[in-house]
Image: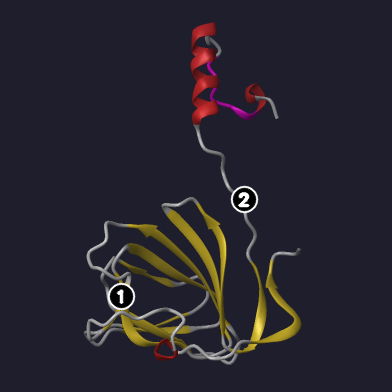
Amino acid sequence: MPLDVADKGQLATETEEMRAIREANVEKAPPAQFFKLRAQLLEQGRSNQGVADNGNMWANLKVYASGGENGLHNHTDQDHFHLVLKGKACFYGPRGEEKICGEYEGIMLPSGSYYRFEAVSDEPLILLRVGAKTPPTAEHRRYNIYGEPLTSDSKENGVVEVVPRQGEFWGAEE
């Protein structure tokens, strides 16, 4: 699509110099990323699918057959949020916080904030997780409540074998 069609903010009094500036700004700007949210449903386990990433901010689609991230933990290099798209999740914090979030509800977590969550409905839990880089505040990216490094793919974090539901998907069409 030509710039003159795409840019509805073009001034009627645009000069050749203004047009050159507009075209140069477009040339040096990064392109937008388009994405779809679509994930295979699971009988067991959890999946984490990257859907967009610009190096500073990213979006992941997470599917949980049941369970969740079992131990209180934090992320020391990012602010992020979880938005429930299907099912229900109960989020817990270290000060007694407990909140069940249904569809289109979520939680915002600043860097260093401890939390955990679990699926609390009979249907699979589907979350949109969006994160943005912050300056690291510790040597490792993720810690358990005892200050020990905790990888996301560890048994201590509730990882079990993934068993997909054959042919069952949630989200946009392919």
User: Residue 74 shows which numbered tag?
Assistant: 1
**Relative horizontal placement of residue 80, taking residue 8 as reference (left or right):** left
Q: Main secondary structure of the magenta part?
A: loop
First reached walking from the N terminus: tag 2 or tag 1: 2
Q: How is the image coloured?
A: secondary structure
| Amino acid of disc 2 | Phe
Residue 147 visible in the displayed image: yes
Residue at the (49%, 25%) spot, across then down:
25
x and y percentages locating residue 143 in the rendered image: 29, 78
- Asked which quadrant contains residue 141, the reply is bottom left
Range drawn in magenta: 6-11
Whether 171 is drawn above or below 18: the answer is: below
Local packing at callout 2 (Cα closer than 10 Å; few below 14, some 14-19, many 20+) is few
Residue at the (50%, 33%) spot, across then down:
29
x and y percentages locating residue 31 in the rendered image: 56, 39
Residue at the (45%, 72%) spot, across then down:
105
Whether 24 is drawn above or below 154: the answer is: above
Discs 2, 1 touching: Cβ within 8 Å? no
Pointer 2: what residue?
Answer: 34
Residue at the (28%, 68%) spot, across then down:
76
Secondary structure of the residue carrying numbered label 2: loop
Q: Nearer the viewer, residue 36 or 87?
A: 36
Q: Nearer the viewer, residue 68 or 136?
A: 136
C-alpha separation, residue under disc 2 versus residue under disc 1: 29 Å
- Asked which quadrant contains residue 50, the reply is bottom right
x and y percentages locating residue 172 in the rendered image: 70, 64
Residue furthest front as drawn: 139
Residue 15 visible in the displayed image: no
